[in-house]
Amino acid sequence: MSIAQAIAPHLPYLRRFARALTGTQQSGDAYAVATLEALVADAATFDDRLDPRIALYRAFLKVWSSIDVNRRTDPGMETDPVRRNLSLMTPPARVAFLLTTVEGFSPDQAAQAMDRTPEDLQDLLGRAGREIAEQMSTDVLIIEDEPIIAMDIENVVQNLGHRVIDIARTRTEAVKAIENREPGLVLADIQLADGSSGLDAVNDILSDMEVPVIFITAYPERFLTGIRPEPAFLITKPFRTETVKAVISQALFFNQKSRKPVRAAS
């Protein structure tokens, strides 16, 4: 199979990634074209030992990282919430975040595309989470009836730089918790201590406000088959700390109502 045949199915996705990374479709397409020109000029730029999509993105990132303009902020990023959030991230963290959240690469695949070690990739994702928290630090409501799990989630939230306003064990406690302080993020179990439903608790909360929600549950089938809020994120127990961190960052990053950060005077 020729390089052209190998990469053709992946070019629309590369254009999407390039647009997200650079801020505009015009700029993204310019980098994509430059990548194709580089592949034509030197076939060795395409590492055929890798999956074709990974090899294509690696070639693209080599072109992108070789030009200083990729570090500039497009003016349009100041008005569009998602593009603005991207502009506030350092370039390597931005790449790692986009590869795993938008493009659906696994951490190992993203590491290959960036020509990094898996450990480097995890460090970059951690940096992305911290940078997002610095700009979008928020109040978090945890709805979880198991104390040890609740403490674990609380530690993850606080380590990212967010604040836990309450830990509710039942639907009633969850609804009461928002009376005095509105959360910017809700992390909820589905089956609660008194037999009540975290889904019902979240729907009660969403009837009064708009807030991103992450369900962390040992019963994902109840989320998938029941009436659920959209959009919402799902993490299955037992969970990995890195997964929770990544999904928190993703939920806040793509929250269209995230506020514009106040920049410090230079």
Image (cartoon, rainbow, N blue to C red):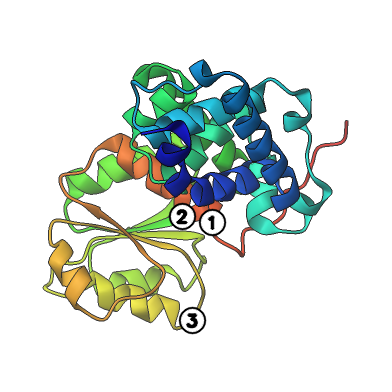
Circle 1: element type: loop
Residue 251: which numbered mark, if any? 2
Report which residue position mark 1 lands on: 254
Q: How far across and how far down the image is residue 143, in percent?
A: 29, 61
Residue marked by disc 3: 208
Q: Residue 97 carries which label?
A: none
Q: Nearer the viewer, residue 174 or 115?
A: 115
Relative image position of residue 140 (x, y in whole percent): 44, 55
Q: Is residue 227 left or right of residue 99?
A: left
Report crowding for label 1: few under 14, some 14 to 19, many 20 or more residues within 10 A (C-alpha): some
**Observer able to see residue 157:** no
Q: Residue at x 62, y 31 (%)?
A: 35
> Is there CB contact under 8 Å for labels 3 and 2?
no
In the picture shown, does residue 174 fall above or below 31? below
Graded by Cα atoms within 10 Å as few (under 14), some (14 to 19) or many (20 or more), the crowding at tag 2 reads some
- Return the x and y of residue 57 as percentages of the image width and height: 50, 33
Q: Is mark 3 on a helix, strand or loop?
A: loop
The amino acid marked with disc number 2 is Ala
Question: Percent x, y for residue 228?
Answer: 30, 76
